[in-house]
Image (cartoon, grey):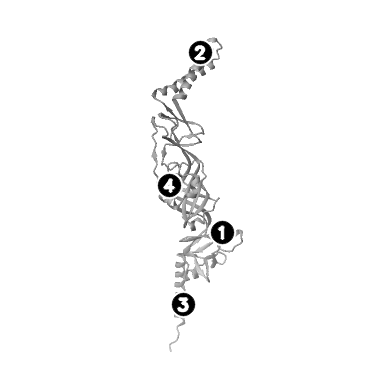
Amino acid sequence: MKKINYSKVFILGVFLYIVFQVVSTLICKNVESQVLESSKLDLKIHTKGLIIRDEYIIKSNDRGKLKLLVKEGEKVKKSQEVAKIYKDDRDFDIDKEISRLDTEIKNIKKSKLDSDIEKSKLKVKQDERDILQSKRQDRVSTLTSDMSGIVSYKLDNNEEKYKYDYFDEITEESIENAINNYEQIDKEERKIKDNEIVMRVINPNDVYVAICISKQEGEKFKVGEFVKLKMKDSDLGYIDAKIEEKHTNKSKVVVILKITNQNVGIYDARVTEFDIIYSEIEGLRIPKESIKLVDGNKGVYVLDESSERLRFVKLKGIVYEGDDFVFVDYYKNNINGVKTVNLYDKILLKPNVINRKIFLKNS
């Protein structure tokens, strides 16, 4: 029987120890970890929306030659004159004459001359103006706006259909079948017939978006709460909206959103695609590749800075779960005294048997 060469065994042992330490160090240096920091997440859906406005059409009240007094996109007041209709071309001169006489009357009054000549001249001018104004009433028709709003010379002939009292009738088909078909109204001076469309006036403070979503998605929309909308291919960015009402339509849910931003220029679109943020959450974003199941509990391996060793920490307070990550509400956990992962914890990514054993202070 050969004698054991203890010196060789000792040397082999030292060699294996050195190899183990080198391999451990190399592996440890390549172990991936992540420090948990506060992140924000927008929970949103993408869907088609039907745009409904408080708007009305101004039509001519006579036939003749139309003269427009307001421009596209101009804001008008209630009862403001927006157009005139003249019986014939000669009636255009009536307003010019009245304007000229108004200027002369104003200048005479401003002169403050108290002579009989000036008084007589003033009376003549006033009488001339009265005659022209009387003639104007018979020869010129005036169109006024019934409400304050924004002027548009485009329409899709659905202005009377899509109104506030139409909400209960909106279905999935209403939204899916809606199209953008706005046509330009002639903005030039022209001959016009009685009851012909002249322009559209929009109340920019009463604009709604109707969407149709699944019942599961509908549970995320509570009446009275607020969301954010972003139109496809628009430079407006996100705009605020309030969940005004919702109702069930077959297997879907129709939600009515009222835009709360002032003067948002959605005037010439009937339907478009929207990104809708229904919730904004803040918390710890934890990759799913770092999550393991231990004794039936989902958790992560956290490096304990004091002992420089890993400890398994059960995840609690998960407020959202995506395909690649979960979101933990650490703020609410801290308030309620829940023991789980916390801000600035260092967690192990892709944990396995080897890196869990050697993830020590060199990690």
Cβ–Cβ under 8 Å for marks 3 and 1: no
Image height of 104 relative to 350, above or below: above
Task: Say above or below: 24 vs 110.
Answer: below
Residue 155 occupies which quadrant of the picture? top left
Of residues 30 and 313, the one drawn nearer to the viewer in this rendering: 313
Please name the amino acid that badge 1 sits on: Tyr
- Give the x, y percent position of residue 291: 49, 65
What residue did someone put label 4 on? 271
Tag of residue 13: 3
Q: Are marks 4 and 2 in contact (CB under 8 Å)?
A: no
Question: In this rendering, which labeled residue sits more in front, label 1 or label 4?
Answer: 4
Which amino acid is tagged 2?
Lys
Q: Is residue 258 visible?
A: yes
Image quadrant holding the N terminus, namely bottom left
Task: Inspect the image, locate mark 3, and give the three-letter code of the amino acid beneath it.
Answer: Gly
Q: Residue at x 40, y 41 (%)?
A: 182
Label 4 to label 2: alpha-carbon separation:
62 Å
* Residue of label 2: 121
Do callouts 2 and 3 mark residues in contact (Cβ within 8 Å)? no
Picture coordinates of residue 108, whole percent (x, y): 52, 15
Q: Nearer the viewer, mark 2 or mark 1?
A: 2
Question: Please, what secondary structure does the residue beneath circle 2 have?
Answer: helix
Chain-order first, disc 1 or disc 4: 4
